[in-house]
Image: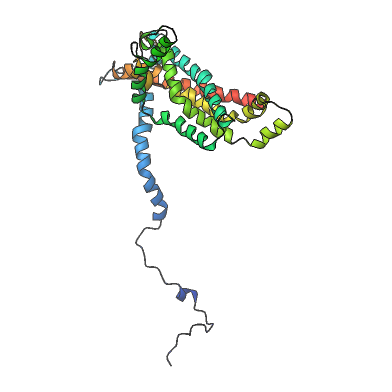
């Protein structure tokens, strides 16, 4: 007697093995699914290792050697690092870079906070205008440093510059901004303020948006004025944002290269020479690769130490 398949709705359940069709073999080895994600990540790690990790490690090795051009490297131990303490140009570049970093921390960052407070406060009540200012603040950050340098070369021009024209318009004498040993570094600081003020203001605006309005309203109901609200409510809650802005300002200040190089090339008489420009001159003009590597690692060490000190300082104030 022939077997008949059960009719639909008859209530007879097929065995699980018969209900699920067998999958055709894929031909892949058992562990291929575990390896596949790493194969997609492999190009990134290859590029990262070849173009970033290997140069960093090899530069550290090279800092213990004396090598000029393509000559055979000669091991000198810590001699390159000892030479840093007696190199007058290196010490001058370190001083200039430190002054620039101090200006970034104590001038640029407070100005950025004031601008953020102004945009956030009643001075710019419209939400559309606040959005406009956010976009305007971000534009200098995406502008090429070459364009910025060319623009400020015109601003600082001795004869036809906008800045000297403004000074002469109010009865003051113009200056040779980029060719004066006294004014070259302050001029670069002015350019940096124009370039980085907006992005730092956006950082502070993001921090201010994370502060609940209820806290300010509660403080105002308790009789606190605007200055008291700022010092007792706003500033303590902005501590993480302030820490981030100061740390990144310090690190990027010690790496500053494009703006002073394009405007003054470190002159006049090394008045605006920075550590990054001096590293470039030693490594790519004098071809002293071992000494240039030592300068680069001293620059990295200084940035790490200063960032660590800022973290410890903010942690100490946070504990208080």
Residue at the far right: name it: 222
Location of residue 158 (image quadrant):
top left
Q: Quadrant of the C terminus?
A: top right
Residue at the far left: name it: 70
In this view of the protein, which residue sits in the foreground, 183 or 3?
183
Q: Position of residue 172 (x, y in %)?
A: 43, 7
* 261 is higher (above) or lower (below) than 125: above
In this view of the protein, which residue sits in the foreground, 142 or 84?
142
Q: Residue at x 41, y 17 (%)?
A: 188
Does residue 237 appear to the left or right of 129 in the view shown? right
Looking at the rendered structure, the number of numbered marks drawn on it comes to 0
Q: Position of residue 226 (x, y in %)?
A: 66, 26
Q: Quadrant of the N terminus?
A: bottom left
- Can residue 54 be seen by looking at this rendering? yes
Does residue 229 appear to the left or right of 113 in the view shown? right
Location of residue 26 (image quadrant):
bottom left
- Can residue 293 be seen by looking at this rendering? no
In this view of the protein, which residue sits in the foreground, 314 or 224?
224
Q: Residue at x 44, y 18 (%)?
A: 190
Residue at the far bottom: name it: 1
* 239 is higher (above) or lower (below) than 41: above
Does residue 219 appear to the left or right of 178 in the view shown? right
Does residue 277 appear to the left or right of 234 in the view shown? left
In this view of the protein, which residue sits in the foreground, 256 or 84?
256
**Which colouring convention does the figure follow?**
rainbow
Q: Position of residue 8 (x, y in %)?
A: 49, 83
Location of residue 65 (image quadrant):
top left
* 315 is higher (above) or lower (below) than 2: above
């Amino acid at each position: 007697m022939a077997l008949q398949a059960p009719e639909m709705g008859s209530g007879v359940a097929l065995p699980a093995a018969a209900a699920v069709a067998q999958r055709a073999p894929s031909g892949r080895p058992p562990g291929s699914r575990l390896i596949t994600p790493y194969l997609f990540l492999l190009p990134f790690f290859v590029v990262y290792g070849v173009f970033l990790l290997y140069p960093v490690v090899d530069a550290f090795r090279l800092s213990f050697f004396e090598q000029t051009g393509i000559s055979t490297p000669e091991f000198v131990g810590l001699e390159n690092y000892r030479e840093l303490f007696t190199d007058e140009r290196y010490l001058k570049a370190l001083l200039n870079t430190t002054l620039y970093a101090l200006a970034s921390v104590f001038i640029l960052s407070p100005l950025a906070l004031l601008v953020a407070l102004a945009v956030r406060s009643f001075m710019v009540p419209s939400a559309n205008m606040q959005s406009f200012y956010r976009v305007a603040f971000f534009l200098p950050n995406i502008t090429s440093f070459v364009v910025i340098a060319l623009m400020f070369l015109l601003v600082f021009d001795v004869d036809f510059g906008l800045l000297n024209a403004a000074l002469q318009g109010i009865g003051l004498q113009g200056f040779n901004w980029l060719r004066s040993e006294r004014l070259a570094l302050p001029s670069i600081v002015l350019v940096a303020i124009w370039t980085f003020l907006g992005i730092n203001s956006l950082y502070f605006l993001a921090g201010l948006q994370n502060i609940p309005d209820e806290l300010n309203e509660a403080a105002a109901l308790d009789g606190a004025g605007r200055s008291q609200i700022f010092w007792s409510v706003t500033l303590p809650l902005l501590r993480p944002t302030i820490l981030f802005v100061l740390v990144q300002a310090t690190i990027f200040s010690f790496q500053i290269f494009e703006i002073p190089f394009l405007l003054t090339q470190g002159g006049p008489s090394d008045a605006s020479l920075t550590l990054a420009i001096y590293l470039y001159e030693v490594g790519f003009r004098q071809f002293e690769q071992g000494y240039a590597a030592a300068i680069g690692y001293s620059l990295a060490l200084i940035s790490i130490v200063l960032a660590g000190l800022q973290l410890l300082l903010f942690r100490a104030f946070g504990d208080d």
